[in-house]
Image: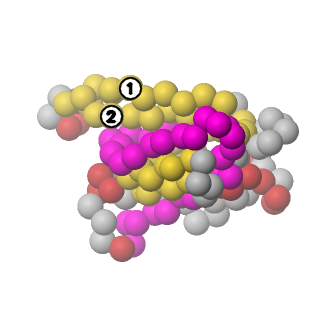
Amino acid sequence: MKKSSGIDGMEKLIESFPDEYRHWHIFSRIISFGFDWEYAPEKSFEEIPCICMVLSDRDERLKIKLLLTNVHGNVNFSIANGFCGGISVTDGSDCGFESENRFRLTGIEQDCDFDVFCENISVELI
């Protein structure tokens, strides 16, 4: 999480977390997951795809809300086990990625086949 400075709200989130919670894989429980379209006047009045997720640690002591905008990719869950080992977030802006592909989120475990690119991420503690 410390290398995620391009994410809106990240600095405030990191300041409020103990050191052991400053890793994306800690938030392995998916509390809610939603997909929607957001109106974007700055993008020629298009509607852009968005994902909103609430994640928590296994004990649900801390919960975070992620909003991913202008997403594309694949999301699949194996509901037989219902286990997600967490997510990994990579900022590709230093690698010359196009702005709409800036962030890549991937699932750590095989039960959560999560491979999504997005333009922006905002995060908040709930």
Report whether 43 appears left or right of 114.
left
Q: Which residue is mark 1?
A: 36
* Residue 40 drawn at (x, y percent): 26, 31
**Residue 84 is at least partly visible in this image:** yes
Position of 91 relative to 42 (above/below):
below
Dot 2: element: strand
Residue 25 — which label?
none
Q: Is the residue marked by circle 2 packed among few (<14), some (14-19), or many (20+) residues within 10 Å?
A: some
What colour scheme has been applied to the protein in the rendered image?
Answer: secondary structure
Dot 1: element: strand
Report whether 54 appears left or right of 104.
right
Report whether 91 appears left or right of 41.
right
Q: Is the residue marked by circle 1 packed among few (<14), some (14-19), or many (20+) residues within 10 Å?
A: few
Q: Residue at x 68, y 52 (%)?
A: 85
User: Are the residues at dot 2 and dot 1 in contact (C-beta closer than 8 Å)?
Assistant: yes
State the count of labels: 2
* Residue 82 drawn at (x, y percent): 67, 38
Q: Which residue is mark 2?
A: 49
Assess whether residue 6 is covered by the magenta stretch.
no
* Residue 27 drawn at (x, y percent): 70, 47
* Residue 36 figure quarter: top left
* Residue 108 drawn at (x, y percent): 61, 57
Q: Which residues are magenta?
A: 65-94
Position of 67 relative to 2 (above/below):
above
Quadrant where the image shows the C terminus: top right
| Residue type marked 1 | Asp
| Residue type marked 2 | Pro
